[in-house]
Image (spheres, rainbow, N blue to C red):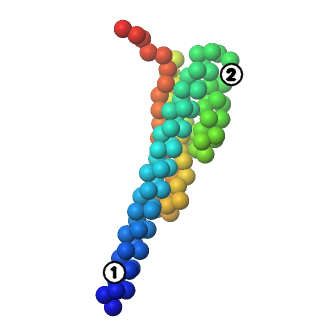
Amino acid sequence: MAGVALVAAAAVLLSVLAMAGNVFICRSKAISAADLAAVSAATVLWEGAADPCAAAQTVARSHKGKLESCRIDGDIVTAGVSVRTSVPLIPQVTSSARAGPIECS
């Protein structure tokens, strides 16, 4: 009976570790996608060529994410991106990033 309990405990521990790993990887993807979406939107805003939030959405999609928010405040762009996980209790993770010009001192 002790052997069955040990195997069950090991299975539960491995499942928890796998879920935590998936959330960690998805969180890293969300951070990268938000950073790149904000930088690309700020670049498009600075160039004045097209819609900055459309550029952010394209970048977020290309990184398997969803653009949750895109806000332009002067020259600063804030982008929020969510990425879906494989964990039922945490269906998605979200990250936001800001980009824009800064004064050099």
Q: What residue do we see at 41% from left, 68% from top? A: 14
The residue positioned 47% from the left and 32% from the top of the image is 97
- Amino acid at pointer 2: Ala
The answer to whether residue 80 is visible is no
Question: What is the distance, in whole Å, between disc 1 and disc 2 at their CAs?
Answer: 60 Å
Q: Secondary structure at mark 1?
A: helix
Residue located beneath label 2 in the image: 50
42 to 4, vertically: above or below:
above
- Earlier sequence position, callout 1 versus callout 2: 1
Q: Position of residue 38 (x, y in %)?
A: 53, 29
What is the secondary structure assignment of the residue under circle 2?
loop
Q: Residue at x 49, y 25 (%)?
A: 99
Q: Quadrant of the N terminus?
A: bottom left
The answer to whether 82 is drawn above or below residue 98 in the figure is below
Disc 1 packing (10 Å; few <14; some 14–19; many ≥20) = few
What residue would you read off at disc 1? 6
Q: Residues within 10 Å of mark 2 (few under 14, many from 20)?
A: few
Question: Seen in the image, is 90 located left or right of residue 45?
Answer: left
Residue 99 appears in view: yes
Mark closer to the observer (1, 2): 1
> What amino acid type should be assigned to the residue bearing mark 1?
Leu
Determine the image quadrant of residue 37: top right
The image shows residue 7 at horizontal and vertical percentages of 38, 80
